[in-house]
Image (cartoon, rainbow, N blue to C red):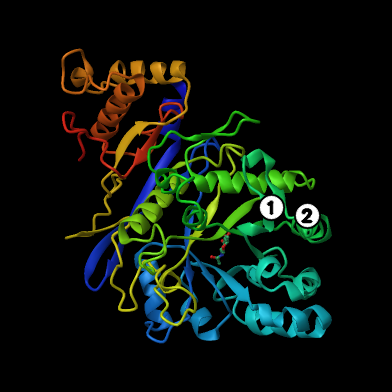
């Protein structure tokens, strides 16, 4: 009860609009800003602006599109001067990319590192808020020839930043694919591949820690699902209501695969002596189109993944192993990119088509007028249900609160009424939580109930029992 009231007070929701082609599109990318004490912290949503295509709008138009979606963080794969100029004076935070191809030469020549930083960072930084450089992309798993050179390259770039007094403003890190792990289940047993753990990851993590930086992870629950659809539940992968997966070592219950993947990385880092490094998810996403053989690819799955992801990241309070540590996420990607090699799915991760129309309405809804009022609101269809795996006693206490002081409409879950069946605590609590959530206009903090409730985008109604939705 106390938890419930606390989060209700502590969170403020900024809902915001996304204007495109004269229409106002509402994005639920709702950033939470916490203005009371640090009781709860939510992560933020950014976007990857990949440009492996020959049909994209100009950088200026792309930046306008991001801004109209109230996206405030963007990650680039290079440091293209036109793009950096388009991002100037926009209040956007920018992660620029340093290409794999140059790791070799920069690692060997400090003078080249200084040149690169001058041209691509120092020259722009007064106008464009460059906050980090992602050095290479998935080097340890895709470009193994330069594994040993990655850290020397980062050191040279760091020295160049120090020489220009930019090292506190601009952080250096390098995005890893999740297969730097040799084990990711259960999360508490997460471990780096033995061939890179102490030789490569340990010094790299030491460097990130010493320089006040963070770990970059590209995490695609979609890949895990595609490889193992018989074992991994789609609902678990898409942040939908599901039975949850328990880590037998810690007893922590995971309601989605992304959290489990991130905790596996946290555990792997802890085993190398790094318990305090922050993780930023530099890429995650779901393709909307693929080859017939690519299991799980569809517009509706992509919309569910990204919509539920945004909701989860902006309303949750860290992962089960690291509560209170916000995870920032960059969705891959802004546009479909027609020139990407590989299977059809590779060219279809975008939230937008090159003509700037939406691929699907994940978190975005057309409205007739700018719906930015003073009243915080989530614009997407959503319901509030009981979380799987929480203790009976907490759930019962939350249900009692919802039907009592919370003034939820609990008449339908009484004996003989339409929502009495299924007669389980979880179903009754879900009905009551949702009633409270809808009555309170879905304001942030109204689907918490001491951590026993969660927001979903799938209608939990059964044929007999309709869950209200407004
Ligand atoms: C740049 O981004 C950082 C990180 O969020 C922020 O603290 C800073 O105020 C921003 N600077 C400008 C000039 O907007």
**Where residue 196 sits: x, y (%)?**
78, 59
Q: Quadrant of residue 19?
A: bottom left
Q: Crowdedness of circle 2 by 10 Å Cα count: few (<14), some, many (20+)? A: few
- What label sits on residue 66 in the rendered view? none
Whether the residue under disc 1 has CB within 8 Å of ligand 1: no
Compared with 237, 130 (above or below) is below
- Tell me whether the residue at label 1 lies in contact with that at label 2, contact meaning CB atoms closer than 8 angstroms: yes
Decide if residue 164 is in sight here.
no
On the rendered structure, is 262 left or right of 362?
right
**Number of the label disc, if any, that sits on residue 182:** 1
Q: Quadrant of ligand 1?
A: bottom right
Q: Earlier in the sequence, mark 1 or mark 2?
A: 1
Q: Nearer the viewer, residue 285 or 124?
A: 285
Q: Which mark is residue 194?
A: 2
Q: How far from the left and from the top, in percent, is residue 287?
A: 40, 64
Secondary element at tag 2: loop
The front one of 210 and 91 is: 210
Residues under labels 1 and 2: Cα distance?
A: 7 Å
The residue located at (43%, 28%) in the rendering is: 452
């Amino acid at each position: 009860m106390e938890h419930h009231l606390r989060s209700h007070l502590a969170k403020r929701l900024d809902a915001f609009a996304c204007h495109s082609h004269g229409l106002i599109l509402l994005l639920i990318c709702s950033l939470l800003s916490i203005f009371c004490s640090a009781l709860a912290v939510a992560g933020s949503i950014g976007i990857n602006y990949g440009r492996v295509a020959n049909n994209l709008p100009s950088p200026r138009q792309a930046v306008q599109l991001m801004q109209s979606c109230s996206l405030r963080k963007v990650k680039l794969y290079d440091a293209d001067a036109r793009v950096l100029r388009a991002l100037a004076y926009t209040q956007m935070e920018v992660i620029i990319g340093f290409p794999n191809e140059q790791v070799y030469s920069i690692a060997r020549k400090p003078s080249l590192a200084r040149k690169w930083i001058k041209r691509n960072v120092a020259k722009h930084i007064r106008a464009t808020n460059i906050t980090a450089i992602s050095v290479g992309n998935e080097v340890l798993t895709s470009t193994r020839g330069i594994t040993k050179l990655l850290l020397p390259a980062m050191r040279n770039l760091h020295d160049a930043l120090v020489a220009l007094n930019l090292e506190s403003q601009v952080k250096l890190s390098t995005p890893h694919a999740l297969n730097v792990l040799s084990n990711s289940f259960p999360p508490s047993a997460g471990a780096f591949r033995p061939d890179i753990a102490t030789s490569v990851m340990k010094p790299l993590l030491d460097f990130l820690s010493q320089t006040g930086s963070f770990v970059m992870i590209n995490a695609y629950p979609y890949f895990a699902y595609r490889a193992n659809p018989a074992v991994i539940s789609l609902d678990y992968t898409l942040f939908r209501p599901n039975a949850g997966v328990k880590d037998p070592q810690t007893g922590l219950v995971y309601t989605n695969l992304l959290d489990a993947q991130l905790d596996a990385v946290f555990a792997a880092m802890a085993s190398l002596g790094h318990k305090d490094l922050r993780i930023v998810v530099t890429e995650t996403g779901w393709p909307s189109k693929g080859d017939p053989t690519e299991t799980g690819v569809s517009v509706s799955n992509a919309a569910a993944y990204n919509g539920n992801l945004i909701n989860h990241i902006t309303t949750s309070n860290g992962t089960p192993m690291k509560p209170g540590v916000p995870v920032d996420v960059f969705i891959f990607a802004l546009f479909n990119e027609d020139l990407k090699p590989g299977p059809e799915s590779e060219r279809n991760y975008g939230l937008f088509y090159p003509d700037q129309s939406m691929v699907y309405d994940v978190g975005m809804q057309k409205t007739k007028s700018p719906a930015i009022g003073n009243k915080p609101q989530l614009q997407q269809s959503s319901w509030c249900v009981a979380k799987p795996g929480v203790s009976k006693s907490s759930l019962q206490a939350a249900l009692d609160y919802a039907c009592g002081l919370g003034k939820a409409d609990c008449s339908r879950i009484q004996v003989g009424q339409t929502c009495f069946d299924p007669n389980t605590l979880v179903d009754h609590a879900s009905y009551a939580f949702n009633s409270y959530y809808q009555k309170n206009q879905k304001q942030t903090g109204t689907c918490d109930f001491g951590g026993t409730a969660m927001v979903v985008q799938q209608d939990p109604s059964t044929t007999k029992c309709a869950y209200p939705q407004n």
